[in-house]
Amino acid sequence: MTTNLVVRLVGFDRKTDRVVVQRDIPPDLVDEVVEIAGVRVPVEEMGDFPLSTERARRIADMLDVQIDTNANEFFLETSAPANSRRKVRA
């Protein structure tokens, strides 16, 4: 799969809805992470994809990230790369 999008594991505190975890998925792991997540649409159409506790843990383990699935809710999210969001000056 080739995409210009950045895919991230994002965790939100269940009480405050604040972002408490945000980790980019390395491009070489995106296909495997998307498969673990159970995404059934192209990544370009995925948007924010909710993760079950088990799937969030498996992805976090791949990224070597400690997460708290009791206190936080996890998603895979896509966004444009940072350099493509910059405004171009003429």
Image (cartoon, helix red, strand yellow):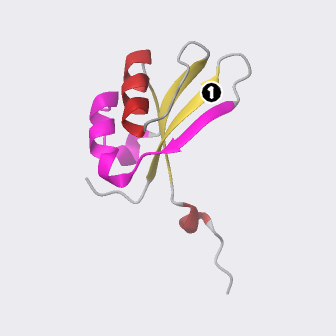
Query: Callout 1: few (<14), some (14-19), or many (20+) C-alpha neighbours within 10 Å?
Result: some
Residue at image x 56%, y 68%?
83
Q: Is residue 69 left or right of residue 90?
A: left
The spot of residue 24 in percent (x, y) is 48, 47
The spot of residue 11 in percent (x, y) is 57, 29
The answer to whether 60 is drawn above or below residue 81 in the figure is: above
Kindly indicate the quadrant of the structure image that contains residue 34: top left
Q: Secondary structure at mark 1?
A: strand
Kindly indicate the quadrant of the structure image that contains residue 54: top left
* Nearer to me, 72 or 83: 72
Q: Residue furthest top?
A: 70
Residue at image x 35%, y 57%?
3
Q: Is residue 40 left or right of residue 25?
A: left
The answer to whether 3 is drawn above or below residue 16 in the figure is: below
**Looking at the image, how many numbered discs can be counted on the residues?**
1
Residue type at mark 1: give it.
Answer: Phe
Q: Is residue 33 magenta?
A: yes
The spot of residue 59 in percent (x, y) is 39, 31
Magenta segment boundaries in residue numbering: 19-46
Residue at image x 43%, y 36%?
64
Residue at image x 70%, y 29%?
18
Q: Which residue lies under the disc numbered 1? A: 12
Q: Is residue 2 left or right of residue 45?
A: left
Q: Is residue 16 magenta?
A: no
The spot of residue 30 in percent (x, y) is 33, 45
Q: Residue furthest bottom?
A: 90
The answer to whether 89 is drawn above or below residue 30 in the figure is: below
